[in-house]
Image (cartoon, rainbow, N blue to C red):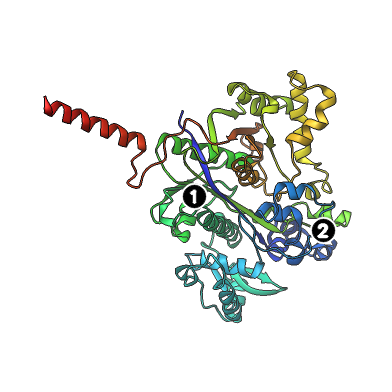
Amino acid sequence: MSKAAVKAASYSLNHVPELSYWYGNTPYVEREEHGETEFLKALPNFVQDYDAAARYAPNLAYIGALTMDEFETKAEPWYKNLEPAVQRFGKYGEIMPEDETIGFIDLCDVFDLVWLEKNFAADVKEKLAKHPLMRDDMLARLEAGHETAEIEKEIAEHGAIALYCAGKIVGCSRRGHEIDPNLTAYELLVNMTCKASAVLSLLYLIKNSGLKPEEIDFVVECSEEAAGDMNQRGGGNFAKAAAEIAGCVNASGCDIRGFCAGPVNALVAAASMVAAGTRKNVAVIAGGAIPKLYMNSRDHVKKEVPALENCLGSFGVLLVPDDGTMPVIRLDAVGKHSVGAGASPQAVTSALVWEPLQQAGLGFKDVDKYAPELHNPEITLPAGAGNVPEANYKMIAALAVMKGQIEKPAMLDFIKQHGMKGFAHTQGHIPSGVPFVGHAADAILAGKMNRAMVIGKGSLFLARLTNLADGISFLLEKPSKDAPEAAGAEGVSKEEIKQMILETLSELAEGLK
């Protein structure tokens, strides 16, 4: 069976405490309903600043500045045991500061929806010009800027919302229509920020793969946002919009949605396209979600711990045809949570873990690492949501006991050996398995791992259409032994060359008769 291989991965964070404070859903709704409450007044006292965010172990593991082995050794709590030095860049991507993020959003804007104050625009242009991924055509998109009075008038009279940085207004996000609820300034800011963060990871994905932008054939975007207007509220297309800015001129694209299960669904769909020969180089990307920023901040303030949810997470994974040198996604053992599977944790785990393992002829211990929802527990525990990765591993271990594959006293050892600590931001689609793909691919190529299982789950009931949940999983394995020979310089494999030689010799023999 044909397979798709993982050629590269990218992961980036945009540190945006002001966007989080003003437009993260929890503080935004609080402000709209109750004004400046005690919670909102206290929240700035618990902000993790850029220096801390870029020394924070889970963030560094996310961007590849720490390997998973290194991360596992770090003292907890991580927010009290910061790394000695700021690390903006990692193997997979970066942690971009807020001022550059706002400038990046502007250069990704194609409808003049973002206005920047002219002095701020000039300062941020100077910084972005030094960015290692910046191209001249991208930098030229950054506007010269507007007078402060223009921006203030747009906010006061035309439905724009302010953009803040370092405690002051540095621009605004404008509305796209006077009455369309899908084109308000807020909705468009959410979508543009999702697009811009996805572009950042797409650019890193291109860099990490060694390909040129024009070599990308197709882009799949799998965040949780929905772009459209009142006539087609979720029509899209984030994927093609991101591809345009990144310079992927030969790519088309589409969006795949499934709440937190969207990214794994997208990877399986993309892998299927590659394996079938429909597309060659397919980039799966996802941008971050403004509404999820400071989602649990009320509990963090109450418990007097840092409000850590002020980074937009984004990622990219590039899938290409299997040539025997790269980790592959198996398409003959994909887990699915069917309509009739049941909603109990045992039923979900059985559908997503046990059943695909049976299809592949494998047992629980044949998977080196399981990657379910990898939420950072320092975010979820103070909010009363528990340690999400640990809960998943306990369920997998319990099922392994039920299936007679391990003894009950071995559960803790199984969890330690086959699990990992959570390190991803709580933006739904971001933690669901995919942050481990890059680390797993590296470990497989280094001979430290044979196989990982990536698991995504989705809360479909949030849309008020069904009470069902969703889930999907796949196995990432070491390179295939039965992969086609690598193509030659003219795109012809060795087997094809051999066949042509044999046919030529046969024709010559016929001619000599």
Give the quarter of the image for residue 458: top right
Q: Is residue 391 above or below residue 429?
A: above
Q: Residue at label 1?
A: 236
Q: Is residue 92 above or below residue 254?
A: below
Is residue 16 found left or right of 184 in the rendered image?
Answer: right
Question: Which residue occupies 64% across, 29% down?
Answer: 352
Quadrant location, the C terminus: top left
- The image position of residue 216, as x and y in percent, is 43, 51
Question: Which residue occupies 58% across, 50% down?
Answer: 225
**Extreme residue toward the right, this view:** 303
How busy is the neighbourhood of tag 2: few (under 14 within 10 Å), some, or many (20 plus)?
A: many
Give the quarter of the image for residue 208: bottom right
Mark 1 belongs to which amino acid?
Gly
How busy is the neighbourhood of tag 1: few (under 14 within 10 Å), some, or many (20 plus)?
A: some
Is residue 416 found left or right of 163 in the rendered image?
Answer: right
- The image position of residue 241, as x and y in percent, is 47, 56
Q: Secondary structure at mark 1?
A: loop
**Dot 2 or dot 1, earlier in sequence:** 1
Is residue 281 found left or right of 120 in the rendered image?
Answer: left
- The image position of residue 58, as x and y in percent, is 74, 52
Residue 511 in view of the camera: yes
Question: Which residue occupies 72% across, 64% down?
Answer: 17
Q: Is residue 416 above or below residue 292?
A: above
504, 474: nearer the viewer: 504
24, 345: nearer the viewer: 345
Mark 2 belongs to which amino acid?
Pro
> Which numbered dot is residue 306?
2
Q: Secondary structure at mark 2?
A: loop
**Extreme residue toward the front, this view:** 512
> Which numbered dot is residue 162?
none
72, 304: nearer the viewer: 72
